[in-house]
Image: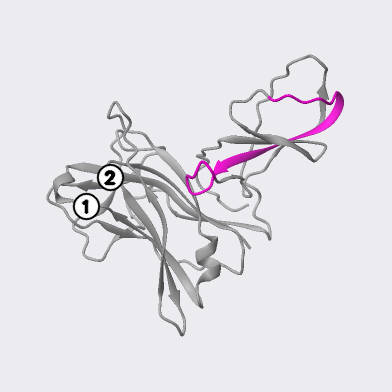
Amino acid sequence: MADEGSLSHDIRDAWVFIDDEMIGIYELPARIPILESGIHKLTVGPGIFVSTNSTNRDNYAFYNAHIDQNFNLIAGETQFVTPVSSYRDPGSTYAYEVIDDFESVIVQIDSFNGSQVPIIQTQDKGFVFEGSGSGLVSIKSTDSLAFFKTPTVELIGDGKLTYLEIDYYSDYTFTIYGRAINTGYQNETFELLNLKPTTDEEDEKEWKKAYINITSMTSGALNPAGFYIFFNISLNNVAERVDGYVAFDNIKFVYQR
């Protein structure tokens, strides 16, 4: 079995089916009315926000659904269900490629393009999401450029569903781009997603998870030999520059073969 990496998640919805007929999509936690009674097959699919967009929700293809083949529905009674999910076994259909979980002092993410700040592995518990380490970028108010990139990886494309998953904390807005390294054509850059600061109203650090659908990039590139992701932390507005931090963890690609 392949190593899917961290099991961190941000499951928002339950996609509910009775005997494979869809009942509805319910934001968790949910109270779900079901008219049937007796023994039925219950399926609960784990729903996510695609690219952090609450208006674009999906039954995440890379997570197993919770299935109870003999769920006893009793008229007039409320029954409590705690669905359990996991990544699907890779087999010949699914693939998982962990880029960096920052558990090693050797960091796979590099600064580039004139970045004035590095990314390092930190074990400071104030910035560690899980495990022993996270990737940390420490920015000063005098910094104006902060760019970071993943190693180049091969991804299938051909319409195969492909996602980038990351856990992150940020004091700044930052933009995620993809770069296709094309054979026989100019390389291409794709703007994938803008992510806002995650500090809450009490100025407390808040980690978030993003499931970023990059299928349009992997399938739309002209003739890609590989791809990399890069992050541009927005420091353009001099008046708004302040000392702060961005932290990353569990950067990985998940895709259909």
- Say which of 114 and 220 sits in front: 220
| Farthest-out residue, top | 76
What mark, if any, has residue 172 been given in the picture?
2
Residue 195, image x, y percentages: 37, 47
Residue 232, image x, y percentages: 30, 56
| Residue at the spot of label 1 | 235
Residue 255, image x, y percentages: 58, 58
Residue 174, image x, y percentages: 32, 51
Q: Is residue 50 magenta?
A: yes
Q: Note whether 123 is above or below 231 in the view shown.
A: above
Assign a secondary structure to mark 2: loop
Q: Note whether 216 is above or below 142 in the view shown.
A: below
| Farthest-out residue, front | 55
What crowding class fits label 2: few (fewer than 14 Cα within 10 Å), some (14-19), or many (20 or more)?
Answer: many
Region of the chain picked out in magenta, as a range: 32-55
Q: Disc 1 vs disc 2: Cβ atoms closer than 8 Å?
A: yes
Q: Amino acid at mark 1?
A: Leu
Q: In percent of the image, x 51 and y 41: which residue is there?
A: 54
What crowding class fits label 1: few (fewer than 14 Cα within 10 Å), some (14-19), or many (20 or more)?
Answer: many
Q: CA distance from mark 1 to mark 2?
A: 8 Å
Q: Is residue 158 magenta?
A: no
- Say which of 196 and 146 sits in front: 196
Assign a secondary structure to mark 1: loop
| Farthest-out residue, bottom | 184
On screen, residue 45 versus residue 186, left or right, reads right
Q: Amino acid at mark 2?
A: Tyr
